[in-house]
Image (tube, rainbow, N blue to C red):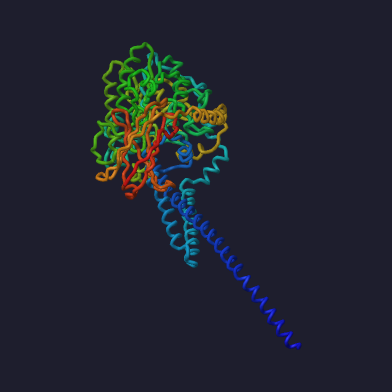
Amino acid sequence: MDDKINNEKEQTDGQVFQNVMDQAEPDGKREKKGKGVVIGILKFLDAFFCVLLGALAMLAFRGIFWMLKTWNNLTMEELMFHLESPLEGTNTGMIVEFIQTCAVPALVTAVVLTLLFVLLRKKKVLFPVAALSVFVISLGTIGFTLLHLWNTLDISSYNSDKSSYSTFIDDNYVSPQDVTLTFPEEKRNLIYIFLESVEMTYTDESVGGAFEENVIPELTKLSLDNENFSGEEAVLNGGRQVKGCTWTVGAMFGQTSGLPLLIPISSNKMDSQDAFFPSISTLGDILESAGYQQSLLIGSDAVFGGRKLYFTEHGDYNIWDYNYFIENGSLPEGYRVWWGYEDDYLFKFAKEKVLEMSQNEEPFNLTLLTVDTHFEDGYLCDECPTAFGDNQYSNVMACSSKKVTEFVEWIQEQDFYENTTIVVCGDHCTMDSDYCEDVPEEYTRKVYTAIINSAVSPENQDYREYLTLDMFPTTLASLGVEIEGNRLGLGTNLFSNTQTLAERFGYETIENELGKNSKLMEELTADIDPKKLEIQEEKKAEEASVPEAELITTDYNYHTGKFEIQVNILDSQDSIQAIRCAVWSHEDQSNIQWYEAAQAEDGTYHADAWASDFFFEEGTYQIHVYAVCDSGNQVLVCAGEEQIQ
């Protein structure tokens, strides 16, 4: 009986256990399924992070090496300048090149890695191996790239200099207000021509250059026939640029004040201020006090970078810029090329204006700035030669060499020339690095220099080592002005026997010292208010006007493999610098392409969208059109779509 009871109990317990197991099995399956979901999410996040990291690594690798190639011999100061420069200071071709060279490879990397992880998503071993490999390679690439950038730009020294002080400027600056300046009884006229990005490097080795073929032969002869302070050597010589003088505004300031433009705000943002170094005395101030009539003639907007502020505050210059000639009708309505108007117009206007100035009793100072040779690759006008084939920058330089020299020769034919000194000087070395990529590292690049019809001759017939800062007192001396002590600012009168700072201390020492803080520079820039820059930027954003525009597209033509985009600007308060068209068919814009629209004679803009750029995919293509205005803002002006099928 007991055995029977025990057997029944065992059967009952076994049934209960089985029932529990039967109930537990679905829960186990759910738990397994839940773990699978978690693993899937983790795999997705892992893959997403690796794809993002891989794309960033490619962008950093391509971007940094592109940057170092684009700006040859780049320094940390120049990098900060480029990073701080506004969009309107950038050539649109350079933006397109960055997208093609850097952004597109990064996008391709992201697509390839995404496909890789999709293919390996069910591979238990290969997936984590691939993820780990991508992670390690990406981090290694980013680390190597940043280390290369750190060493190339010597960022350690830059940081050290920014935290330390130097008395170099304080000890060597000579204020013109403390110096006796004696003008000749009959004051001479001055024509000062700043040549955008022109350096003596472009000549051949026989005359001191670094190129196999001389790209600027007319300018070479002009300098050799006149004064460049090479002494008895039949070669070119020029000033070396230093920190604070490596871009146009800084160069113009340095050559007319003897000081580098070392300021506590972005390099090209002095137009946000109410004053431009109000406590110093410059070339313009000195000539104004001596009774000169003065004018600045440039082919762009003089407001940019604070040029108008500087030249009106220091010398009360007349400002004859792009806006001036648009407003007085000297340019066709709506006319704009390159930065405003090209050098053909510059020299045309210069001839007219200098004849007007020469009719007055007062001596005159006409200062010009060329623009066609601005990087990247310059502005190729219809008259430019093609002797250098597809090397556009060489063709532009050769064209500029001829035009500048022709203008100088025209001046020499005028009645006022006998009592006129002409200074022709590059503003800074070119930033178009691939143009000088074959120049040996040991070659010393210097800006082009020529002083024509000077009132005095050099006392020292040796080959001089000098800086562009030395042009300040040297220009005055070329007008016959006697300078007590032969030094002004950080510059030295090169017509004298007095040593330049470059000859006394060496270029490297000067560069190192200028990279440090200076008590004197802090005093001279004490009125610069960064908050005014912020207010200016906010005001620009508020006042930004959106041009009214109309978008017209032609039907896709499968014979030509493209459809055409036409943009009609109906109304705009700002001048249009460029029209850019963004085209894509994928919802996430992963296949977006940018097209720069060319302006036709009737004022409309045209661009071709090629199906080959999208691998001939059929579908609906979105089109967004952006205008880059004078204010520097890039705004969406119209949109539409096109079918490819």
Label tally: 0
Does residue 2 appear left or right of residue 89 in this picture? right
Residue nearest the viewer, comparing 11 with 160: 11
* Residue 228 visible in the snapshot: no
Query: In the image, what residue occupies the spot 39% across and 42% down?
Result: 622
Q: Quadrant of residue 354?
A: top left
Quarter of the rendering containing residue 396: top left
Please tell me whether residue 519 is drawn above or below residue 74 in the rendered image.
above
Residue 323 appears at what percent x and percent y?
39, 22
Which percent across, then down, holds residue 568? 35, 30
Between residue 201 and residue 385, name the one nearer to us: 385
Considering only vertical position in the picture, is 54 above or below 564? below
Q: Position of residue 1 (x, y in %)?
A: 76, 88
Residue farthest along the top direction in this orientation: 361
Q: Can I make out residue 375 in this image?
A: yes
Where is residue 13? Give x, y as percent: 69, 79
Residue that appears at 24% across and 34% down? 385
Q: Who's the residue at 36% across and 34% down the image? A: 551
- The answer to whether residue 396 is left or right of residue 77 is left
* Residue sitting farthest toward the right: 2
